[in-house]
Amino acid sequence: MKSRAKKYTPDYKLKIVNYAIHTNITQASYIFEVTRKSVSKWLKLYRKKGYEGLLERKKREDEQPKKLTEIILESISRIRLESPNITLNDIKKQYDLDCSLVLISRKLKEFFEGYFKVHQRLIVTFRMITPGKSRKKKKRIYQFNIYDCMNNRLYFGFGEERNVKNLCIFISHIIEGMKVHGLIVDNAYVSTNLKYLKQLSCGVSHYDENIYSKYNLPLVVENNRHFIRGKINKLSYSDDEKDLIISAYEDMILNSDNIRFIQPLITDCAENKGYLYSLVKLNSTEVLKETMLKIEEYGNNAMISFDFDAAHDFFNKIYLTSIEGNDCEWHSIKLDSMYKMLSIHYHFKDYKRSRTVIEDILISPNVHKLKSYGDVYNLLGLICFYENKRDESDRYFSKSNEIFLDKSKKDHIFDFYRVNIRKYINRKNYREALVFSNKYVRTATSHKDELELCRAFDMKGVVYYFSGNMTMSEKCFKKQLELAEKISDYTEEAKAINNLLSVITYTVSTKKEIVENHIERMKELALIIKKEYYLYEAFQFSANFNCNTGNYQQAIIDYREVVNGCIKYFDMYNIVRNLFYLAYSYYNLNDTDNAIKYLKEVCAYSNDSDVEYHSSALNYLGRIYLDNGDLNKSIKYYNLAKRSAGHDTNNYIVADSLKSIGIIYEKKENFKSSFNFYKRALSSFRKQSNKSSMEIITDNITFIKEKIALISELIK
């Protein structure tokens, strides 16, 4: 009887596909021991449908399309209410329906006609009106309306801009006011003829993000313009009423429900005029500015107490306001809040959202007047540096440097030093970076600014760290830690411990108690400053120290914690790095099965920025199979390691792979090939200039020379 084919999970298929993309189908098939046909099939499905294509489906479902039954219709209707942006074509594909789009549309229309007869209908429209005589500047004024069919009430507001964001904020305020006064029921839905409410913004529509997610109100787009036009046309306003409504709408977009120093009001207008949900009546512009400054103060206080969620909410209120004026003071408040939001995202290593805010800042009017304008490019340069995009990083650091030079250098001297240090570290010009570090220390000392002096030692220690001088790096980080403890700055203290551990955990002579004390303190600080990834950094240092001191069992436990944390933050580089050291720990415990498992995961998850770990993993796989006597597999992996490292003869992995292939051919008694590989390995090792591993290189050179001399005799 023929055995059933082996089943693979979608996640395992994804690993194989990632490896095939990184290398090729043949290598993926060889490493994961599946047929080329299967790898090719999964790769095509992944490229066509993404992860969904790797999910297992029964052939019967593919061969027999479904028909539009009553059960399916109810399910589709529910999806259409919950996700107004979904198209009929998407629905047809999702349910694999064997019917036309026209039929689906007609059936849905019939369903909704019955559904909406018993549900509260809120009709959203807008119209443009001419400005009143009392207004000096002739600008278009837009009137936004929500008509409640159940209670026969009209809610309205005015604004000088018609866009999706403004309209959604207006809808949100009206619904909030209705909820407060018990004027909305659970089965309510929003009906509109404004199709742009359904348009997607970064995968989600403004309506879904701002209204549906908060109030669970479905959106239905239908032609209701004529229905409400007569009701609106009956309403007439005096100039004073228009100014009042415009001011109220401008203040409504603030949406400061948590700020109670301005009490929200429900203003009862004349009969048939409905209700106006308002925050202020008079002098709204000045009140709005005062409100912004107050919210900014709340946000600053929240940041000081490390309540970053609250701080982000406060700054986001300012960020979401859409009033555009020529008042520089207004722009400075808004831009400053956007920069503080950026600093919060960067604080949590959320580089994707950081980039989004940076883009919004850079396209804002009067951005050059932002006090932290230069630091925006500095942060962008740092993000690129951490993403291993050196050219982009250099460009942004240079731009930041230009901005600080254009501004008063006296006011931004410390920013100027920091960006130049980072620029030269990125260029690997450590001598010049050290020059600026020393200037930074001297200037901070002369200013008697202990916080900046703390940061200066941080930067100087980083320069020594990247240049390979760990002794001087450790001294600088110790001074940074002393100053941070002296001024009781928890953020700088956590950073100093993080820096110090990155040096001393690789030193065998360091006392275990010192490392453990630093790690425990770092965990405490992570909870205080609400920087969760510092917890995983603490586990990282613990793992490195245990691995370096031979305590591989504990290192494995710690590396697993780090991998879980990295998955949470989707930090792929550190996932790959820690999987490699997890495999290395198993290798040293002679657990070759787990070592092979995690080395293959390194190969599957790594990409172009992880070439070092990818090639090292292949090299270790070759070593394991060589130790196990599987010479064919071993030589295969060593060749893959050479190819992954780019055949760079200055690379230790290439040299080691060449030496190992020479050993394999010697075992096979193919002495001519062995002799050639030994000669290439000898040349490669002689090119190595890494002083920290000179002893290993010297031992390899001695070993290869002896082999070459021995094989030369055999060939003769």
Image (spheres, grey):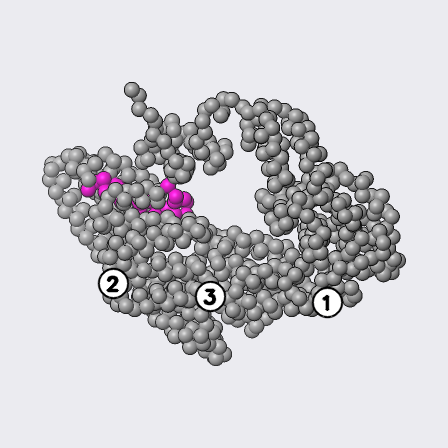
Q: Is residue 607 visible?
A: yes
The image position of residue 543, as x and y in percent, is 31, 57
- The residue at which mark 1 appears reads as 287
Tell me the quarter of the picture where residue 15 sits: top left
Taking 71 as reference, is 277 left or right? right
The image position of residue 330, as x and y in percent, is 69, 64
Tell me the quarter of the picture where residue 312 sits: bottom right
Asked which secondary structure carries label 2, the reply is loop
Which of the image's four quarters has the N terminus? Answer: top left
Which span is picked out in magenta?
604-627
Identify the residue at image location x=19%, y=53%: 699
Taking 507 as reference, is 61 left or right? right
The image position of residue 298, as x and y in percent, is 60, 68
Q: Can residue 456 be seen in this view?
A: no
The amino acid at mark 3 is: Ile
Tell me the quarter of the picture where residue 690 sits: bottom left
- Residue 610 magenta-drawn? yes
- The residue at which mark 3 appears reads as 529
The one of 627 and 228 positioned closer to us in this rendering: 228
Asked which secondary structure carries label 3, the reply is loop
- The residue at which mark 2 appears reads as 508
Magenta stretch: dominant secondary structure: helix
